Image: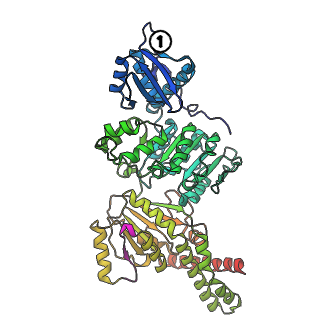
Amino acid sequence: MMEYDPYDELPELPEELLLPPYLKDAGSAGRTYGELTYNKRSRSWVIRGEPVVCQMAKRLFPGCDGKGRGVARFTANRKNAGDLNWLMLRYPLTVRASDQARWEQALEEARQWAVAKERARTSPQALDPPKARFKGELMEFQREGAAYLVNTPRALLADEMGLGKTVQALAAVAELRAYPLLLVVPSHLMTNWQREIEHFLTNEDGSAPTVHVLRGLTPYELPEAQIYIVHYLLLRGWKNALPKYDFACVVFDEIQELRHSGTEKYSAASLLAEKCPRVMGLSGTPIYNRGGEIWNVINILDFHALGDWESFTREWCYGYGNNIVAKPDLLGETLREEGYMLRRTKEQVLDQLPPKRRLVQEIDADDEIYRSLMEPVREAIYRLKHAQAAFDRTRIEDEICQRMRQATGVAKAPYVAAFVRALLEGGEKVLLFAHHHQVMDAYKTALKAARPVFITGRETTAMKDKAVDAFMAGKTDLCCISMRAAAGLNLQRATCVVFGELDWSPAVHTQAEDRAHRMGQKDSVLCYYLVSPAGSDAQMQEALGLKVSQFVQLMGDTVMEESQTLLMQQEAREHIRILAEQLAERYG
């Protein structure tokens, strides 16, 4: 794999204009106050010196370990190297001869980091990646986000959910040509990342980037590829293997998965990030009110960037070792000012958003469940093959299609539930639409902790009214609704609409979306269409025009003429026939 320098693509500006004074060369001095050495075991710089310098170090720098008289320890990272140089401008130290080269390298990395941060402020604040490598169109705030990721080698993009963090990361990768790239993603989003890569990235010769998906917990020699994808649950098995590869960039999608330290998954991610020159974290739910969680996340991006755990909790939290941040807003502001995080909310970019944002997201499905539920279809296929009358064939085709739709919905229900849980954790108020009772039952079990309410064909009018009241009053943030039972409901409190199953009719989807987006509303409602590559979704996507994943405008929002409605019904009928024929060939 090629060696990659994350600073190569940054704009060239005179370094003397960008380098802060505290990172200037300390030069030689006639008087020194002690010795600076490197401790490999603890990955720290150690001052052994006169009381005046050790006392000053412990007073000024929260990340300085103050244990022991005449000794001061700094974790070896770029920020602390800069702080040490600052201290040495006032109190010169002798660097042990065997550590001199390491110190010069550490100081140079600190300077590069400081210059990169300044460049991020002086460089263009928005970018359009080359069309020869990127096939999408970005909104203005997405162009700014992509520029931030390009200008900041270790960064957290924490935009609110639905603002396109995936496409911004891919735009940055295209701009940088940051290959080989490693994507670490939740298991239920692996298929979606593959589709996003296929849709947005291309090589300059017109070919698609080569992608390899890691399989299993047992490491093997990775084949040559431009992009590698692994899910978090496999990291522990690849803990020692992945850091041996020279990845140009690693992207941790939903990096809040690493908010708890002490696990093999966290340890593996830490080793990987330490080795990689460029690290991107993506999360719509940054947690900076719980100190331990945000400290762990930032620690993956840049080791001890917020100081060590003891100093962080002492200065930011309610006492030494406490997990709750005293002033979370101030911590969020500090993360942004220091260049570690960029976050935009929907309200901040509302003028750039359409009234509805329709996103198609591919998720996985349980193949074993799908096959089990499809087994009874064999008998219907047999009847279809021997049916002579057109009426009989149509009736059997509908039966087969209905069973296939139900099997598809049930098989992907656990992954839909995982997706919805992430939305709820991010503070979204969700309307979850489905069609089959069996699918709704799966949601009820999987999402029990969210205390969902239901509006389906099984509730009385009084029960439905109670469900609406509970959602609108904030007693729950999840309302599950049958797709064809949504007419007349006013659920404007919702910020997000999720389709766990699809309907053949675009009008049914539009009507469901409008439960959250009402006439005159000055908001942008996010509508997710969760689709599986297996089962009935592919043909239903074809019928609905659900082809593009990002901010797709898949259907009109005006009332269709009767002739248009009839045409859509005829097209759906043809797709149902194709589905039945495909199954007949597969099971025949």
Q: Does the magenta run of residues contain 290?
A: no
Q: Is 335 placed left or right of 227 in the picture?
A: left
Q: Is 523 placed left or right of 366 in the picture?
A: left
- Between 102 and 576, which is closer to the camera in this rendering? 102
Does residue 514 appear in the picture of this structure? no
Residue furthest bottom as drawn: 389
Local crowd at mark 1 within 10 Å, few (<14), some, or many (≥20)?
Answer: few
Number of marks in picture: 1
On screen, residue 187 above or below 21:
below
- Between 272 and 535, which is closer to the camera in this rendering? 272
Q: Position of residue 545 (x, y in %)?
A: 55, 66
On screen, residue 62 above or below 259:
above
Query: Which amino acid, by three-letter code, is at mark 1?
Result: Gly
- The residue depicted at 40 percent of the width and 82 percent of the height is 457
Which residue in the structure is indicated by mark 1? 27
Task: Identify the coloring.
Answer: rainbow
Does residue 33 appear in the picture of this structure? yes
Q: Quadrant of the C terminus?
A: bottom right
* Element on which disc 1 rests: loop
Q: Quadrant of the N terminus?
A: top right
Q: Position of residue 345 (x, y in %)?
A: 37, 50
Q: Does the magenta run of residues contain 451?
A: yes
Q: Position of residue 451 (x, y in %)?
A: 35, 69
The part of the chain drawn in magenta is 448-458
- The residue depicted at 59 percent of the width and 57 percent of the height is 195
Residue furthest top as drawn: 30
- Between 32 and 369, which is closer to the camera in this rendering? 32
Q: Position of residue 424 (x, y in %)?
A: 39, 61
Residue furthest front as drawn: 68
- Between 549 and 116, which is closer to the camera in this rendering? 116
